[in-house]
Image: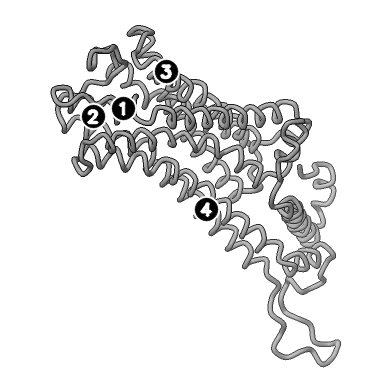
Amino acid sequence: MDDDNYEAAKNSSEQSINSFYFYKTEQFVVLWLLFVAIVAGNSAVLVTLLLSKARRSRMNFFIMHLAIADLLVGLVSVLPDIIWRMTVSWVAGNLACKAVRFMQAVVIYSSTYVLVALSIDRLDAITRPMNFSGSWRRAKLLVIASWLISFLFSSPIMVLYEEREIQGRLQCWIELAEPWQWRLYMSLVTVTVFLVPAIVIAVCYALIVHTIWTKSRQLMPPPPPPHPASSSSQQPTSPLNHCAHPEEVELRRASSRGIIPRAKIKTVKMTFVIVFVFVVCWCPYLVFDLLQVWGFVPRTQTSIAVATFIQSLAPLNSAANPIIYCLFSTHVCRAIRKIPVLKWLWCGMSGSTKTESSYNTLTESSQRASASAQIRHHPTNIQLISQHPTH
């Protein structure tokens, strides 16, 4: 509601403009559709994760917390907005004003920063795939940090918002008297809600793509020797070609089948979708607000109506996230399809599961080949390795 607050404050002595009455039916339709999509989609994801017998994983842990944050966006942010547009005036009192506004800010921040935590965890999983010790502890710390940051960034709301009389009606309002205060406020909101998370997410997935690209080039089979051996007495000098074992052969064959390139393409697609959806949902709202407070958008009824619709679409990110889960996590999609009303759901990118399985097999083969090489070079370690198998 920052757009409405700013406009009302700037026009309190001018022509009465109340954005609640502009395109009221259309606003209700958009908000109700958003509310149903957010609550239904994220509830289905949570039920699926809680009832699924699938292997417990860090990815599911992050998805669960992101679904909780997105579900709260619908219940704490979108639903009160619908009720407020029905009553027009704020009727819940000053304490409820501060509490509701504070929780709305918390869930918006948490939905964003849990996504940042997930991106950091995925970067750690890709760049250090064998570092299992403490991985769950790091994942929990990332989630805790994302919620703490959300509460910290939302704390000024408790002071800024109060129940005030605006144009003859009680409203839960923010009062900033000077234009520079509005500019500072909206600039800080843009940086903390959008710019910092977008930069961190983009950097994380760029490093993920770079890592997979680099590893795929390392796993490519070596080029054939320029002069083939003419007799059995000539032996290749490369240690990789000396006494090749089945695991190494499997590794090279897997690489030649294009498994790594497929995984690389999938990561690029996931990177594009996550960053693109986040930017598309939040960029118009924040850019319009900045243009408004800096005086680049004229104060008219049309601009207020446009601002109201743009702001209503900002929570669309919370409705889109469950769709992204289904597109890039087929086991989540298939589990959701077990819910009777969601049997129509299309689990796209069916090849992704096969690719993930093949990539995991490739990684395990690489590990086995490495262990076999260590055993061949250090035969005294055979008993030690057999007594302490790698997990």
Residue that badge 1 annotates:
19
Marks 3/4 in contact by CB < 8 Å: the verdict is: no
Residue that badge 4 annotates:
272
Task: Residue 140: give x, y in percent of width and height.
Answer: 57, 29
Marks 2/1 in contact by CB < 8 Å: the verdict is: yes
Above or below 193: residue 253: below
If you read the primary sequence from the N terminus, does the residue marked by circle 3 or circle 1 appear first?
A: 1
Q: Residues within 10 Å of mark 3 (few under 14, many from 20)?
A: few
Q: Residues within 10 Å of mark 2 (few under 14, many from 20)?
A: many
**Disc 4 versus disc 2: nearer the observer:** 2
**Disc 3 versus disc 4: nearer the observer:** 3
If you read the primary sequence from the N terminus, does the residue marked by circle 3 or circle 4 appear first?
A: 3
Screen quadrant of the N terminus:
top left
Give the Cα separation between the discs numbered 2 and 1. 9 Å
Quick one: 229 or 153, which is closer to the camera?
Answer: 153
Q: Amino acid at mark 4?
A: Phe
If you read the primary sequence from the N terminus, does the residue marked by circle 2 or circle 1 appear first?
A: 2
Marks 1/4 in contact by CB < 8 Å: the verdict is: no
Task: Residue 247: give x, y in percent of width and height.
Answer: 81, 62
Give the Cα separation between the discs numbered 3 and 2. 20 Å
Give the Cα separation between the discs numbered 3 and 1. 13 Å
Task: Residue 17: give x, y in percent of width and height.
Answer: 24, 26
**Disc 2 versus disc 1: nearer the observer:** 1
Q: Secondary structure at mark 3?
A: helix
If you read the primary sequence from the N terminus, does the residue marked by circle 1 or circle 4 appear first?
A: 1
Q: Secondary structure at mark 4?
A: helix
Residue that badge 2 annotates:
7
Q: Amino acid at mark 1?
A: Ser
Q: Residues within 10 Å of mark 1 (few under 14, many from 20)?
A: many
Quarter of the image where one finds residue 19: top left
Give the Cα separation between the discs numbered 4 and 2. 35 Å
Residue 93 shown left or right of residue 349 in the figure? left
